[in-house]
Image: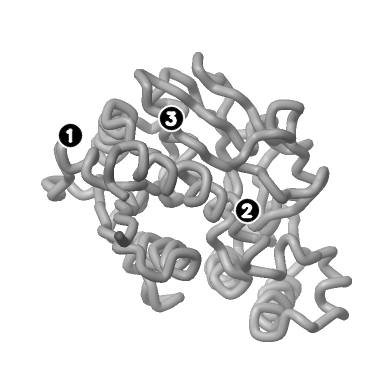
Amino acid sequence: MALRFLVIEGNTQGARQAHREAYGLMPSESYAAVLQDIEPDAICDLAFPADEGANLPDAAGLESYDGIVLTGSHLNIYDRTPDILRQIDLMRAVYASRTPSFGSCWGLQVAAVAADGDVRQNPAGREIGFARRLMPTEAGASHPLLAGRPAVYDAPAIHLDMVTTVPAGCTILASNAVSPVQAAEITVNGGTFWGVQYHPEFSLGELAVILGRRSKILVDEGFCRTPDDAASYVADLTALHKNRDRFDLAWRHGLDTEVLESERRTREIGNFIAHRVRPEKSARGRA
């Protein structure tokens, strides 16, 4: 039987429509496409809890899915506005449903706060483009979420906030010099979440579109010296997306197969499906 996923979009309506206009898909649609690339028969429903009055699944609805995935977001969770509080409440319901869940960036932050952890701005500043020199912890080295990852790897990333207080029931699985919590497992009330602070779902093409819309940040925060430098960086990523054999560009930006090959880049999502979704579907009598 086909696997059924719920993809929970973390963005407000305006932000997801702006992403669609620039990239062709909303972030949740793009994430669903990645799930279906890994699992071609997968059925993906989308949910928009940032929208007031959104039609969200109840407890039985959440339990009916084989896996639940949370996207990134432009929001800052410490603002605690209604569109954010709805997402925290929904994540608490996800834990209670005990349905396997996974999230990227904002998804990890929502899962941490829903488990009584905390998220704040990173005093080290923004991590943008790629999270460099990610290293599994002792627990992460043998954890199935990171199965197949080398001892040091890079991944697409863009975030200013990070988990600053680890909730009870959390195991840190990967860290780097910018953020101590780059991958984690969180267990609450019998429900278990796997998540990463980076974005394994982002192709270089999607990352390039996102950075192209944030060129002012790249310049203002010192990542690029001029708007032309920012445009050149985005153009290089776009070219690499179209032709990953551009060794010159890969060398220039220090990118290897962990980023360039989609199966490797999306490894955590594939591991979530292989080690959580499929086995628990069978254990719950859904095979």
Element type where label 3 sits in the image: strand
Query: In the rendered view, does 192 fall on the left or right side of 233?
Result: left
Q: Is residue 48 above or below residue 209?
A: above
Q: Which residue is mark 1?
A: 59
Q: Earlier in the sequence, mark 2 or mark 3?
A: 2
Q: Amino acid at mark 2?
A: Ala
| Numbered mark located on residue 192 in the image | 3
Rendering quarter of residue 58: top left
Q: Is residue 73 above or below residue 113?
A: below
Query: In the rendered view, does 51 fall on the left or right side of 264?
Result: left
User: What is the quadrant of the N terminus in the image?
Assistant: bottom left
Q: Earlier in the sequence, mark 1 or mark 2?
A: 1
Foreground residue among 89 and 282: 282
Q: Earlier in the sequence, mark 1 or mark 3?
A: 1
Q: Amino acid at mark 3?
A: Thr
Q: Amino acid at mark 1?
A: Ala
Element type where label 2 sits in the image: strand
Which residue is pictured at 74% across the width and 35% down the height?
141
